[in-house]
Image (spheres, grey):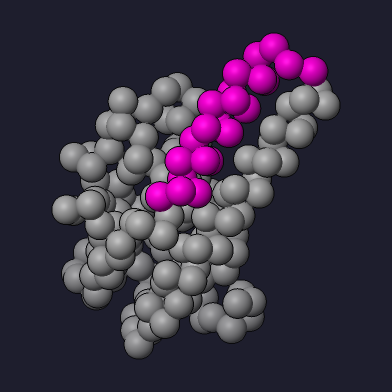
Amino acid sequence: MDNEEFSPTCRLIAVHLDERSIGRGSQDQEHERRVAAYDLIEENVFSPVGYDAGPYGLHISLQDGRLVLDIRDADSQPVVVHILSLTPLRRVVRDYFTICDSYYAAIRSATPSQIETIDMARRGLHNEGSEILRERLAGKIGLDLSTARRLFTLVSALYWKG
């Protein structure tokens, strides 16, 4: 979806990750979470289907092994809650973490070409996860690829239990 399809109020102004759902990650993982949350707030397209009272706040959590996207209005009043199975994302998230571990190790000791190769694989998995997330949210939430990428990073954070 192109950004031109959405009004200026179709956006997130706040994102909260449920602390009970998340364990502390490594320093690299914590940094990636902070950057993704900041970037998501700074630039996003987010439009719950059937609602046009944005901007929105998003509370992300895990409940009973399912992803919960609790969407609120600017006054923190409930708009809609979407509960999604994580099964379609499990493989790509597992592979993404494996390649991220390799990437973080490589940036400390590998050659630039080795780092670039690992980073390309990491970005490819990240794109795959983002597309799966967009497919799972189709008909529920309109978002662009950049928003889906940042959201995938945050959803992945729920798996980062120490």
Query: Which image quadrant: the C terminus?
Result: top left
Q: Is residue 124 above or below residue 148?
A: above
Judge from the rendering whether residue 62 lies leftward or rightward of residue 135; answer left or right: left
At x 42%, y 30%, the residue is: 30
Q: Quadrant of residue 20?
A: top left
Farthest right residue in view: 113
Q: Is residue 42 above or below residue 19?
A: below
* Magenta residue check for 31: no
> Which of 161/61 is in front?
161
At x 50%, y 49%, the residue is: 92
Q: Is residue 83 above or below residue 27?
A: below
> Which of 81/75 is in front?
81
Judge from the rendering whether residue 153 lies leftward or rightward of residue 19; answer left or right: right
In this picture, which residue range is highlighted in magenta? 90-111
What percent of the width, then of the height, locates residue 74? Answer: 30, 67
Q: Main secondary structure of the magenta part?
A: helix
> Which of 146/108 is in front?
108
Asked if residue 99 shows in the view, the reply is yes
Label count reads 0
